[in-house]
Image: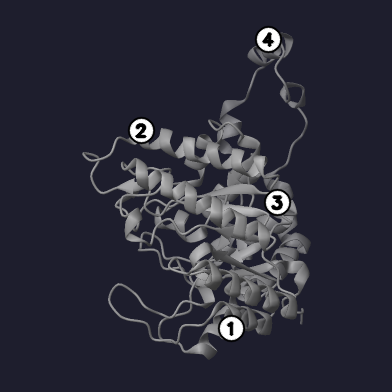
Amino acid sequence: MADYQPHPQHKFTFGLWTVGNPGGDPFGKAVRKALSPVEIVQLLSEVGAWGVNFHDNDLVPIEATPAERDRIVKDFKQVLNDTGLVVPMATTNLFYDPAFRDGAFTSNDPKVRAYALHKTMRAMDLGVELGAQTYVFWGGREGTESDAGKNALDAGKRFREALNFLCEYALDNQYDLKFALEAKPNEPRGDIYLPTTGAMLGFIATLDHPEMVGVNPEMAHEHMAGLNFMHAVAQAWDAGKLFHIDLNDQNYARYDQDLRFGSQSIKQAFFLVKFLEDVGYAGARHFDAHAYRTDNLDGVKAFAKGCMRTYLVLKEKAAQFKADPEIQALLAQINADDGSVAQFSGKYSADKAKSLKAYEFDRVALGQRGQPYEQLDQLTIDLLLGVR
Protein backbone atom coordinates (compact mmCIF):
# COMPACT_ATOMS: atom_id res chain seq x y z
CA MET A 1 0.00 0.00 0.00
CA ALA A 2 1.21 3.49 -0.81
CA ASP A 3 2.33 5.94 1.84
CA TYR A 4 -0.64 8.23 2.40
CA GLN A 5 1.13 10.24 5.09
CA PRO A 6 1.75 13.92 4.31
CA HIS A 7 5.31 15.11 3.87
CA PRO A 8 6.71 18.63 3.37
CA GLN A 9 7.18 18.09 -0.38
CA HIS A 10 3.39 17.80 -0.74
CA LYS A 11 3.02 21.44 0.40
CA PHE A 12 -0.27 20.89 2.23
CA THR A 13 -1.50 24.00 4.03
CA PHE A 14 -4.48 25.06 6.14
CA GLY A 15 -5.68 28.46 7.29
CA LEU A 16 -5.95 29.51 10.90
CA TRP A 17 -9.67 29.95 10.14
CA THR A 18 -10.11 26.36 8.93
CA VAL A 19 -8.98 24.01 11.69
CA GLY A 20 -9.58 26.88 14.09
CA ASN A 21 -13.27 27.13 13.17
CA PRO A 22 -15.26 26.59 16.40
CA GLY A 23 -18.33 25.28 14.59
CA GLY A 24 -20.67 28.24 14.77
CA ASP A 25 -23.08 28.95 11.94
CA PRO A 26 -25.92 31.41 11.20
CA PHE A 27 -28.31 29.14 13.13
CA GLY A 28 -26.21 28.12 16.11
CA LYS A 29 -23.38 29.25 18.34
CA ALA A 30 -19.91 27.71 18.51
CA VAL A 31 -19.63 24.10 19.68
CA ARG A 32 -15.85 23.88 20.08
CA LYS A 33 -13.39 25.79 22.21
CA ALA A 34 -11.66 28.57 20.30
CA LEU A 35 -7.99 27.76 19.70
CA SER A 36 -5.23 30.34 19.80
CA PRO A 37 -2.98 30.74 16.73
CA VAL A 38 -0.21 28.99 18.64
CA GLU A 39 -2.49 26.04 19.44
CA ILE A 40 -3.62 25.84 15.81
CA VAL A 41 -0.04 25.69 14.53
CA GLN A 42 0.73 22.96 17.06
CA LEU A 43 -2.33 21.00 15.85
CA LEU A 44 -1.27 21.37 12.23
CA SER A 45 2.21 20.19 13.08
CA GLU A 46 0.73 17.16 14.81
CA VAL A 47 -1.31 16.12 11.76
CA GLY A 48 1.58 16.63 9.34
CA ALA A 49 0.77 19.87 7.51
CA TRP A 50 3.54 21.85 5.82
CA GLY A 51 2.22 25.37 6.23
CA VAL A 52 -0.33 27.68 7.79
CA ASN A 53 -2.07 30.68 6.20
CA PHE A 54 -3.98 33.50 7.84
CA HIS A 55 -6.14 36.58 7.54
CA ASP A 56 -4.66 39.51 9.44
CA ASN A 57 -7.31 39.31 12.17
CA ASP A 58 -7.08 35.52 12.50
CA LEU A 59 -3.71 36.23 14.01
CA VAL A 60 -3.99 39.74 15.44
CA PRO A 61 -7.49 40.78 16.65
CA ILE A 62 -8.72 43.97 15.04
CA GLU A 63 -8.90 45.70 18.45
CA ALA A 64 -5.34 44.72 19.49
CA THR A 65 -2.99 47.42 20.74
CA PRO A 66 0.48 47.75 19.17
CA ALA A 67 1.98 46.03 22.24
CA GLU A 68 -0.51 43.16 22.00
CA ARG A 69 0.19 42.86 18.28
CA ASP A 70 3.94 42.56 18.91
CA ARG A 71 3.46 39.90 21.59
CA ILE A 72 1.11 37.84 19.42
CA VAL A 73 3.46 37.97 16.43
CA LYS A 74 6.45 37.09 18.61
CA ASP A 75 4.65 34.03 19.99
CA PHE A 76 3.53 33.03 16.50
CA LYS A 77 7.06 33.26 15.13
CA GLN A 78 8.28 31.13 18.00
CA VAL A 79 5.77 28.34 17.38
CA LEU A 80 6.58 28.42 13.66
CA ASN A 81 10.24 28.02 14.54
CA ASP A 82 9.48 25.23 17.02
CA THR A 83 7.32 23.23 14.59
CA GLY A 84 9.00 24.05 11.28
CA LEU A 85 5.72 25.17 9.67
CA VAL A 86 5.92 27.95 7.09
CA VAL A 87 3.58 30.77 6.06
CA PRO A 88 3.27 30.67 2.25
CA MET A 89 0.13 32.84 1.96
CA ALA A 90 -1.59 35.66 3.80
CA THR A 91 -4.72 37.70 3.22
CA THR A 92 -6.80 40.51 4.70
CA ASN A 93 -10.21 40.22 6.34
CA LEU A 94 -12.21 42.86 4.47
CA PHE A 95 -15.62 41.35 5.09
CA TYR A 96 -16.29 40.70 8.80
CA ASP A 97 -16.17 44.10 10.47
CA PRO A 98 -19.31 46.28 10.18
CA ALA A 99 -17.20 48.92 8.44
CA PHE A 100 -17.25 46.65 5.38
CA ARG A 101 -20.99 46.10 5.30
CA ASP A 102 -21.11 47.50 1.74
CA GLY A 103 -17.76 46.16 0.62
CA ALA A 104 -14.20 47.37 0.99
CA PHE A 105 -12.51 48.38 -2.25
CA THR A 106 -15.89 48.83 -3.98
CA SER A 107 -17.75 50.54 -1.15
CA ASN A 108 -19.68 53.67 -2.05
CA ASP A 109 -18.06 55.38 0.95
CA PRO A 110 -14.60 56.81 0.07
CA LYS A 111 -13.56 56.63 3.74
CA VAL A 112 -14.24 52.88 3.76
CA ARG A 113 -12.24 52.45 0.57
CA ALA A 114 -9.33 54.35 2.11
CA TYR A 115 -9.57 52.31 5.32
CA ALA A 116 -9.54 49.10 3.28
CA LEU A 117 -6.24 50.15 1.66
CA HIS A 118 -4.86 51.18 5.06
CA LYS A 119 -5.78 47.81 6.57
CA THR A 120 -4.46 45.85 3.60
CA MET A 121 -1.07 47.57 3.54
CA ARG A 122 -0.59 46.81 7.22
CA ALA A 123 -1.66 43.21 6.64
CA MET A 124 0.75 42.89 3.71
CA ASP A 125 3.53 44.11 6.01
CA LEU A 126 2.60 41.40 8.50
CA GLY A 127 2.40 38.69 5.84
CA VAL A 128 5.83 39.55 4.45
CA GLU A 129 7.26 39.68 7.96
CA LEU A 130 6.14 36.08 8.43
CA GLY A 131 7.42 34.87 5.06
CA ALA A 132 4.34 34.95 2.82
CA GLN A 133 5.01 35.21 -0.92
CA THR A 134 1.40 34.96 -2.10
CA TYR A 135 -1.27 37.44 -1.07
CA VAL A 136 -4.90 36.47 -1.67
CA PHE A 137 -7.83 38.84 -2.20
CA TRP A 138 -11.33 37.48 -1.62
CA GLY A 139 -13.91 40.22 -2.02
CA GLY A 140 -16.52 38.78 0.31
CA ARG A 141 -18.59 41.97 0.51
CA GLU A 142 -17.67 43.38 -2.92
CA GLY A 143 -21.12 43.16 -4.42
CA THR A 144 -24.79 44.06 -4.06
CA GLU A 145 -28.21 42.86 -3.06
CA SER A 146 -29.79 45.48 -5.34
CA ASP A 147 -28.15 47.14 -8.31
CA ALA A 148 -30.18 50.24 -7.51
CA GLY A 149 -27.64 51.21 -4.87
CA LYS A 150 -24.27 50.64 -6.51
CA ASN A 151 -22.96 51.27 -10.01
CA ALA A 152 -21.27 48.12 -11.30
CA LEU A 153 -19.00 50.07 -13.65
CA ASP A 154 -17.84 52.37 -10.85
CA ALA A 155 -17.30 49.35 -8.59
CA GLY A 156 -15.01 47.73 -11.16
CA LYS A 157 -13.02 50.93 -11.53
CA ARG A 158 -12.64 51.21 -7.76
CA PHE A 159 -11.47 47.61 -7.44
CA ARG A 160 -8.95 48.16 -10.25
CA GLU A 161 -7.68 51.35 -8.63
CA ALA A 162 -7.20 49.55 -5.30
CA LEU A 163 -5.24 46.68 -6.81
CA ASN A 164 -3.08 49.04 -8.85
CA PHE A 165 -2.35 50.99 -5.66
CA LEU A 166 -1.42 47.84 -3.71
CA CYS A 167 0.78 46.50 -6.50
CA GLU A 168 2.69 49.77 -6.44
CA TYR A 169 2.93 49.57 -2.65
CA ALA A 170 4.46 46.09 -2.92
CA LEU A 171 6.93 47.25 -5.57
CA ASP A 172 7.84 50.39 -3.63
CA ASN A 173 8.63 48.28 -0.56
CA GLN A 174 10.45 45.61 -2.61
CA TYR A 175 8.07 42.91 -1.40
CA ASP A 176 8.44 39.55 -3.16
CA LEU A 177 4.67 39.15 -3.42
CA LYS A 178 2.28 37.88 -6.01
CA PHE A 179 -1.42 38.67 -5.67
CA ALA A 180 -4.09 35.98 -6.19
CA LEU A 181 -7.74 36.96 -6.71
CA GLU A 182 -10.41 34.58 -5.41
CA ALA A 183 -13.81 34.48 -7.11
CA LYS A 184 -17.16 33.54 -5.60
CA PRO A 185 -20.63 33.95 -7.15
CA ASN A 186 -22.63 34.90 -4.05
CA GLU A 187 -22.75 34.72 -0.24
CA PRO A 188 -22.50 36.72 1.89
CA ARG A 189 -23.69 39.25 -0.72
CA GLY A 190 -26.59 38.50 -3.01
CA ASP A 191 -24.23 38.91 -5.97
CA ILE A 192 -20.46 39.29 -5.70
CA TYR A 193 -18.56 41.15 -8.41
CA LEU A 194 -16.22 39.08 -10.63
CA PRO A 195 -18.03 35.87 -9.63
CA THR A 196 -15.94 33.26 -11.44
CA THR A 197 -12.30 32.49 -12.11
CA GLY A 198 -12.80 33.35 -15.77
CA ALA A 199 -14.17 36.77 -14.82
CA MET A 200 -11.12 37.37 -12.62
CA LEU A 201 -8.76 36.41 -15.45
CA GLY A 202 -10.43 38.94 -17.73
CA PHE A 203 -10.20 41.63 -15.06
CA ILE A 204 -6.48 40.99 -14.42
CA ALA A 205 -5.66 41.92 -18.00
CA THR A 206 -6.93 45.46 -17.30
CA LEU A 207 -4.52 46.12 -14.39
CA ASP A 208 -1.36 48.19 -14.49
CA HIS A 209 0.76 45.24 -13.35
CA PRO A 210 -1.00 42.11 -14.63
CA GLU A 211 2.24 40.14 -14.27
CA MET A 212 1.92 40.45 -10.48
CA VAL A 213 -1.67 39.24 -10.28
CA GLY A 214 -3.12 35.78 -10.74
CA VAL A 215 -5.98 33.77 -9.29
CA ASN A 216 -6.78 31.56 -6.33
CA PRO A 217 -9.60 29.32 -7.57
CA GLU A 218 -11.69 27.57 -4.92
CA MET A 219 -13.48 24.32 -5.62
CA ALA A 220 -16.58 25.12 -3.56
CA HIS A 221 -17.01 28.54 -5.12
CA GLU A 222 -17.07 27.24 -8.70
CA HIS A 223 -19.35 24.34 -7.70
CA MET A 224 -21.80 26.78 -6.07
CA ALA A 225 -22.39 28.16 -9.56
CA GLY A 226 -22.69 24.68 -11.06
CA LEU A 227 -19.39 24.99 -12.91
CA ASN A 228 -16.58 22.51 -13.51
CA PHE A 229 -13.75 23.47 -11.16
CA MET A 230 -11.03 21.61 -13.01
CA HIS A 231 -11.87 23.53 -16.18
CA ALA A 232 -11.43 26.83 -14.31
CA VAL A 233 -8.10 25.62 -12.93
CA ALA A 234 -6.99 24.55 -16.41
CA GLN A 235 -7.87 27.97 -17.82
CA ALA A 236 -5.87 29.66 -15.04
CA TRP A 237 -2.91 27.35 -15.61
CA ASP A 238 -2.99 27.93 -19.37
CA ALA A 239 -2.92 31.69 -18.72
CA GLY A 240 0.05 31.32 -16.36
CA LYS A 241 -2.12 32.66 -13.54
CA LEU A 242 -2.59 29.73 -11.14
CA PHE A 243 -0.81 31.39 -8.22
CA HIS A 244 -2.63 29.50 -5.43
CA ILE A 245 -5.51 27.05 -5.05
CA ASP A 246 -8.18 26.35 -2.44
CA LEU A 247 -9.22 22.72 -2.08
CA ASN A 248 -12.43 21.66 -0.36
CA ASP A 249 -15.72 20.13 -1.46
CA GLN A 250 -19.23 21.27 -2.15
CA ASN A 251 -22.60 19.95 -3.20
CA TYR A 252 -23.64 21.77 -6.36
CA ALA A 253 -25.98 24.76 -6.06
CA ARG A 254 -25.87 24.88 -2.24
CA TYR A 255 -24.65 27.51 0.19
CA ASP A 256 -20.89 27.59 0.71
CA GLN A 257 -20.32 24.31 2.55
CA ASP A 258 -16.49 24.13 2.71
CA LEU A 259 -16.57 20.37 3.12
CA ARG A 260 -13.55 18.11 3.62
CA PHE A 261 -11.71 17.64 0.34
CA GLY A 262 -13.06 14.64 -1.57
CA SER A 263 -15.99 14.09 0.77
CA GLN A 264 -18.71 14.94 -1.76
CA SER A 265 -17.55 15.10 -5.39
CA ILE A 266 -15.01 12.31 -5.61
CA LYS A 267 -14.82 12.10 -9.42
CA GLN A 268 -14.41 15.87 -9.76
CA ALA A 269 -11.73 15.79 -7.06
CA PHE A 270 -9.94 12.99 -8.91
CA PHE A 271 -9.76 14.88 -12.20
CA LEU A 272 -8.58 17.98 -10.36
CA VAL A 273 -5.75 16.12 -8.62
CA LYS A 274 -4.90 14.37 -11.88
CA PHE A 275 -4.67 17.73 -13.64
CA LEU A 276 -2.45 19.31 -10.97
CA GLU A 277 -0.12 16.32 -10.96
CA ASP A 278 -0.06 15.96 -14.76
CA VAL A 279 0.96 19.58 -15.33
CA GLY A 280 3.43 19.62 -12.44
CA TYR A 281 1.77 22.28 -10.31
CA ALA A 282 4.39 23.12 -7.67
CA GLY A 283 2.49 25.55 -5.46
CA ALA A 284 0.83 25.06 -2.11
CA ARG A 285 -2.21 22.82 -1.89
CA HIS A 286 -4.34 24.79 0.52
CA PHE A 287 -7.37 23.22 2.20
CA ASP A 288 -9.96 25.94 2.76
CA ALA A 289 -12.51 23.79 4.53
CA HIS A 290 -14.03 23.13 7.95
CA ALA A 291 -14.76 20.09 10.09
CA TYR A 292 -18.38 19.13 10.62
CA ARG A 293 -20.08 21.06 13.39
CA THR A 294 -20.93 17.73 15.01
CA ASP A 295 -17.25 17.01 15.81
CA ASN A 296 -15.04 17.92 18.71
CA LEU A 297 -11.27 18.52 18.58
CA ASP A 298 -10.43 14.91 17.69
CA GLY A 299 -12.79 15.25 14.74
CA VAL A 300 -11.02 18.41 13.63
CA LYS A 301 -7.76 16.49 13.55
CA ALA A 302 -9.44 13.68 11.60
CA PHE A 303 -10.80 16.26 9.17
CA ALA A 304 -7.36 17.75 8.52
CA LYS A 305 -5.76 14.34 8.11
CA GLY A 306 -8.60 13.30 5.82
CA CYS A 307 -8.10 16.25 3.45
CA MET A 308 -4.43 15.36 2.98
CA ARG A 309 -4.97 11.60 2.85
CA THR A 310 -7.66 11.89 0.17
CA TYR A 311 -5.41 14.07 -1.98
CA LEU A 312 -2.63 11.49 -1.74
CA VAL A 313 -5.00 8.60 -2.50
CA LEU A 314 -6.25 10.44 -5.58
CA LYS A 315 -2.67 11.22 -6.57
CA GLU A 316 -1.98 7.48 -6.51
CA LYS A 317 -5.15 6.84 -8.55
CA ALA A 318 -3.96 9.42 -11.12
CA ALA A 319 -0.71 7.49 -11.49
CA GLN A 320 -2.67 4.25 -11.92
CA PHE A 321 -4.84 5.91 -14.58
CA LYS A 322 -1.71 6.88 -16.47
CA ALA A 323 -0.26 3.38 -16.24
CA ASP A 324 -3.42 1.37 -16.95
CA PRO A 325 -2.99 -0.28 -20.39
CA GLU A 326 -6.72 -0.57 -21.14
CA ILE A 327 -7.36 3.05 -20.26
CA GLN A 328 -4.38 4.23 -22.26
CA ALA A 329 -5.45 2.11 -25.25
CA LEU A 330 -8.86 3.79 -25.23
CA LEU A 331 -7.23 7.22 -25.00
CA ALA A 332 -5.01 6.32 -27.96
CA GLN A 333 -8.10 5.31 -29.92
CA ILE A 334 -9.91 8.52 -28.97
CA ASN A 335 -6.97 10.70 -30.00
CA ALA A 336 -6.02 8.70 -33.11
CA ASP A 337 -4.62 10.81 -35.95
CA ASP A 338 -3.74 9.34 -39.36
CA GLY A 339 -1.82 12.49 -40.26
CA SER A 340 -3.94 13.27 -43.30
CA VAL A 341 -4.69 16.84 -42.24
CA ALA A 342 -1.42 17.61 -40.46
CA GLN A 343 -0.55 20.21 -43.07
CA PHE A 344 -3.43 22.38 -41.85
CA SER A 345 -2.41 22.60 -38.20
CA GLY A 346 -0.39 25.37 -36.62
CA LYS A 347 -0.22 29.04 -37.53
CA TYR A 348 -2.16 30.63 -40.31
CA SER A 349 -0.76 31.23 -43.75
CA ALA A 350 -2.55 32.26 -46.92
CA ASP A 351 -1.40 29.10 -48.72
CA LYS A 352 -2.55 26.92 -45.83
CA ALA A 353 -5.96 28.58 -45.79
CA LYS A 354 -6.29 28.14 -49.58
CA SER A 355 -5.38 24.44 -49.38
CA LEU A 356 -7.76 23.84 -46.48
CA LYS A 357 -10.65 25.47 -48.34
CA ALA A 358 -9.96 23.21 -51.32
CA TYR A 359 -9.65 19.99 -49.28
CA GLU A 360 -12.44 17.41 -49.74
CA PHE A 361 -13.76 16.10 -46.39
CA ASP A 362 -15.89 12.97 -46.02
CA ARG A 363 -18.53 14.58 -43.84
CA VAL A 364 -20.61 11.41 -43.54
CA ALA A 365 -17.62 9.42 -42.29
CA LEU A 366 -16.80 12.15 -39.77
CA GLY A 367 -20.32 11.89 -38.38
CA GLN A 368 -20.11 8.10 -38.07
CA ARG A 369 -17.04 7.94 -35.88
CA GLY A 370 -17.97 7.18 -32.28
CA GLN A 371 -15.77 7.65 -29.25
CA PRO A 372 -15.64 5.11 -26.40
CA TYR A 373 -16.23 7.65 -23.66
CA GLU A 374 -18.70 5.41 -21.82
CA GLN A 375 -16.12 2.64 -21.55
CA LEU A 376 -13.43 5.06 -20.48
CA ASP A 377 -15.62 6.65 -17.83
CA GLN A 378 -16.60 3.25 -16.43
CA LEU A 379 -12.95 2.23 -16.22
CA THR A 380 -12.33 5.48 -14.32
CA ILE A 381 -15.16 4.64 -11.92
CA ASP A 382 -13.78 1.10 -11.48
CA LEU A 383 -10.39 2.61 -10.74
CA LEU A 384 -11.81 4.98 -8.14
CA LEU A 385 -13.89 2.24 -6.54
CA GLY A 386 -10.82 0.03 -6.22
CA VAL A 387 -11.94 -2.83 -8.48
CA ARG A 388 -9.16 -2.45 -11.05
Real-space CA distance between mark 2 and mark 1, rounded to the nearest whole angstrom = 43 Å
Mark sitting on residue 154: 2
Question: Which mark sits nearer the N-terminus, 1 or 4?
Answer: 1
Within 10 Å of disc 1 (Cα), the crowding (few <14, some 14-19, many 20+) is some
Q: Label 1 sits on what residue type?
A: Glu
Residue found 69% across the figure and 48% down from its top: 175
Real-space CA distance between mark 4 and mark 2, rounded to the nearest whole angstrom = 47 Å
Q: Nearer the viewer, mark 1 or mark 3?
A: 1
Question: Which mark sits nearer the N-terminus, 4 or 2?
Answer: 2
Within 10 Å of disc 3 (Cα), the crowding (few <14, some 14-19, many 20+) is some
Q: Nearer the viewer, residue 181 or 73?
A: 73
Q: Contact, CB < 8 Å: mark 4 with mark 2?
A: no
The residue that disc 1 covers is: 39
Number of marks in picture: 4
Question: Which mark sits nearer the N-terminus, 3 or 4?
Answer: 3
The residue that disc 3 covers is: 331
Tag 4, which secondary structure? helix
- Residue 33: quadrant of the picture: bottom left
Within 10 Å of disc 2 (Cα), the crowding (few <14, some 14-19, many 20+) is few
Tag 2, which secondary structure? helix
> Looking at the image, is 92 positioned above or below residue 52?
above
